[in-house]
Amino acid sequence: MGQHGPRPGPQASRQPSSRQAALRGGVLGAGSESEEVGKSGPGSPPVGLLPCLDSACSCPGSLPVVPAPGGCKEGTGSAFTCPARVAQSDHGCAMRTALVHHEDMTAARLLWEDPECEIERPERLTTALERLRQWGLEQRCLQLAAREASEAELGLVHSPEYVSLVRGTQTLSTRELQALSGQYDAVYFHPSTFHCARLAVGAALQLVDAVLTGAVHNGLALVRPPGHHSQRAAANGFCVFNNVAIAAKYAKQRHGLHRILIVDWDVHHGQGIQYIFEDDPSVLYFSWHRYEHGHFWPYLRESDADAVGQGQGRGFTVNLPWNQGGYHLESLSQSVCMVAKALLGDPALPLSGPMEPHHSALESIQSVRAAQAPHWKSLRQQGSTPILNPSTYSLERRASPVSPGGPKFKAAEAQASAALSSLLDQLHLNPTLPVRTAVALTALDAALVLPADVLRKEGSAPQEETRAWARLHEALAQDKALTALGKVLHLLNGILDGQVSSGIAATPEPALAPTLDVVIRRSLSHGARRLLCVAVGQLDRPTDLADDGRNLWLNIRGKEAAAPSKFQVSVPLPGTTGGFVSCVLALVLPLAYGFQPDLVLVALGPAHGLQVPQATLLASLLRGPAGGRVLVLLEQGSTSQLAGVLARVLQGEAPPGLGPFSMASPEDTQALIYLRGQLEAEWKMLQVAAPQVP
């Protein structure tokens, strides 16, 4: 939540060489010899953690404390209970998402006039929390009260002298606070800043503990002050302590993590995180930020794509500098809600508008590929070697910041408000369905264990309707195939009518291709304007299916890479994890988003060759283009494990990991390059480089 305004002046353009030299002095691991990180004293439980005393709980033994709903647990004498037990709904299904906040973080506020700092105000937190409540999202989360981080935990990133300086602000007068604030760039201090900033860090650590001990799957921390600009011994850009950097260090030290990815999507570059981890190969830092060729705050050369890290950390800093766009403060609470919905597993709204990347966006992505290609072999496999074209940078040519109230600001505000109104209209017209996932399986699958909130559809379509569709294919006249077809049509009708978001259905192997044909025709004749069919395995496109732009057929495991038309694409199944990921990310998803389907069909046919992690990753990623409307067709001989994991993934859980990574083979890479070259003129989302300007 690190949105803020730039403060003009020499402080915004400190030279990176001196700053980097200071950072290379090292980071202390503890505040003092007697205070260990995460502990309040020798042999005691970690700060914010209590040993679980519930004999019926299967947690690892010590988890973040949560106020018990009914006060002290009988027999424990404790007013706290284990989140692994609190995070249970009425039907015993574990809650997946934690929400961490604390009302005390609203205490700090600006005590004097400062146009650049006035937008960092308590309402940025309270409005977001209020909107979460209005949308019914707070109630769906496991709520944790933030704790204060210890000074030893702050010392994982910050110097003792800096921590002491911030601690001293608690007793300063308003004039002294203003004078101290003026020594930093876009920062203000308040007597409550130290307490608020420690809570902000503690909230992040609470979340790390909750996720890594298995109490929840994921979580969201609502905090202020933000943190990603602050450095080892300096506040910056509203940020006092670097919450995310401390959380990463804590996760490594406390929980033994070896590799951490930090994704920082903010209008401003999180240079504080970059400086802290620039020589650390155990942390991959990815920042997507507005840059404007160096003319946007914080006006740093190292915010550009060619800043890739230092020493052993080269290649582990990835900057995607955006040279367009902006932000609108009132959209913040809606953004928080959309993040919470994603974490809870709700399907994202389909993207709208023309699916064509902006020239400037392609230039930025091309620059990142060029800068990172020497460090990542996978980027060197994607065709022609990109040429680095760093953004033009000149402090002397730096444009003046867009000031609130000016014509450019008002135009950007109006544009953002229109986009926000469109988003809210979509949310109103497309509410999250009460039944997210349903399955239509035969009696032979009765032993399958499904999540409690997945509906097992027992009904069938009307017999007359089923028999009418079955007349199209002789294979569907068999009793088992006809019964399965009725169940498939019943489930499909529920999806098309808006009763169910997604589903899984099974059919006998000889009837899978005919059933898929019926499903395609039934969908296009009853409400679906555009249908994407991803057929995996030995499945041929129906011969008399119209090539009219209403259906896109994508066959994975085709005999060869081919594109007979814009709407018929065939690609061999890659033989490695790297090849599979490249195929999905560089071909399947660009086509899917470019097509903008109303419904996605995934058919796993004979000899599909996908392992459970691959099949579930594919289904999970295809939830996005159609707003979660996905129907998966399986052979009845498929394993119960596959059906069970697919159900959980369509319900919003993360798919299992793919296992050890192996690079794409040259043959798979060439097939992908060939298809992209054949199709990118028709499907603009396949473009990876900006067209050359003559």
Image: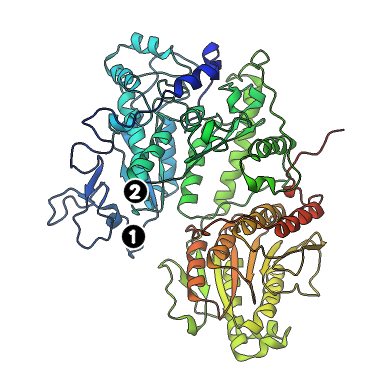
Residue 142 visible from this viewpoint? no
Amino acid type assigned to the residue bearing label 1 in the image: Ser
Q: Looking at the image, which residue sits at the far right?
A: 694
Of 665 and 465, the residue lying toward us: 665
Mark 2–mark 1 distance (CA, rounded to whole Å): 17 Å
> Left or right: where does residue 523 sit relative to residue 14?
right
Q: Is residue 487 above or below residue 45?
A: below
Sequence-wise, the earlier of marks 2 and 1 is: 1
Q: Quadrant of residue 616?
A: bottom right
Q: Residues within 10 Å of mark 1 (few under 14, many from 20)?
A: few
Q: Which mark is residue 210?
A: 2
**What residue is disc 1 on?**
89
Amino acid type assigned to the residue bearing label 2 in the image: Ala
**Which SS class for mark 1?**
loop
The residue shown at (62%, 52%) is 350
Q: Is residue 600 above or below residue 231?
A: below
Residue 534 visible from this viewpoint? yes
- Where does the image place residue 523, in percent across and percent down from the top left? 68, 69
The residue shown at (72%, 39%) is 362
Q: Is residue 432 above or below residue 238?
A: below
Q: Looking at the image, which residue sits at the far front?
A: 311
